[in-house]
Image: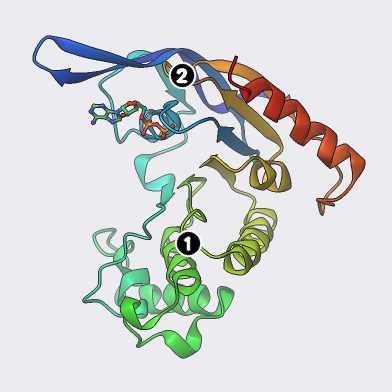
Amino acid sequence: MKPIIKTTNLTKFYQEAPGKHLLALENIDLSITEGEFFVIVGPSGSGKSTILRALSGLDTDFEGQVYTLPSINPSDLGFVFQQFALLPWLTVYENIELGLIGRNIPEAERKEVVRRELEQFGLQKFSESFPHELSGGMRQRVGIARAMATDPKILFLDEPFSELDYFSAETLRRELLEIWHKRKLTIIMVSHIIQEALELSDRIAVLSGRPGHVLKIINNTLPRPRNLRSPEFYKLEDKIYSLLKPT
Ligand code: ADP
């Protein structure tokens, strides 16, 4: 199957100071299939967010290639960030609507879409609330609803649940899986939580510490829904931990 997005020899230097460069990523080859739930894990500083930015076109200053299927436009990409990135002076309704503004969508249709997302994410009662009135979990639910309002073909998530308490994170992970299943999109997510990666993914790219390179691509064929306490789950978890063990 043709990849929806892939990288070849993706290498990234950051300029730390004039004349001083930091090698963040080295020869990253990733190939992501349409409809796949792909997770990138690795220690802090291994370049996970850098890969996401290159894949999504937020950063174009790198060496190597990023190839995206020609049928994918920038408007087909959705983003969810760790810090929610909601505008505090807008209501939940307006935050979700934000992604649709500037896309030439008539107001009546915008209303319809926002209503759909409010319902999908159980946010109807909060449509007139402001972000500061919501819990972290609810705020990230708005963050995901806003991304989904534009019907993305590829959804990028950068550590979306790291700021949340255990129970909110667990609920949102389940909701994300439901949405992925129902709306048949490709998901590329960054995480530093191995259990989370195994719970969600079809495949996992395990990155080394800086400069990040791919240590291994793990095929996660555990039956869904994932049983986090099965021996097979523990076995894969151990396999990833041993890859990441400092030597
Ligand atoms: P991760 O997401 O795995 O924590 P990042 O992709 O954020 O890693 O960063 C990889 C490395 O590049 C880190 O060492 C980080 O400090 C460095 N880095 C990230 N962004 C910049 C930047 N804008 N300027 C300089 N160094 C950066």
Colour scheme shown: rainbow
Reading the image, the residue beneath label 2 is 212
In the image, residue 218 lies at what x, y percent?
Answer: 72, 26
Whether tag 2 and tag 1 are in contact, CB under 8 A, the answer is: no
Whether disc 2's CB lies below 8 Å from ligand 1 is answered yes
Picture quadrant of ligand 1: top left
Nearest the eye: 79 or 207: 207
Reading the image, the residue beneath label 1 is 144
Q: Give me the residue at 43% from left, 86% from top.
A: 126
In the image, residue 88 lies at what x, y percent?
Answer: 25, 73
Nearest the eye: 4 or 188: 188
Q: Give me the residue at 60% from left, 25% from top.
A: 206
**Looking at the picture, which amino acid does disc 2 mark?**
Gly
**Looking at the picture, which amino acid does disc 1 mark?**
Ile
Q: Give me the residue at 55% from left, 21% from top.
A: 30
Q: Is residue 122 above or below residue 220?
A: below
Instruction: Residue at the far right: name it.
Output: 231
Q: Is residue 74 above or below residue 87?
A: above
Q: Is residue 247 above or below residue 161?
A: above
Helix, strand or loop at label 2? It is loop
In the image, residue 77 lies at what x, y percent?
Answer: 42, 45
- In the rendered structure, which disc, 2 or 1, sits on the residue that comes first in sequence? 1
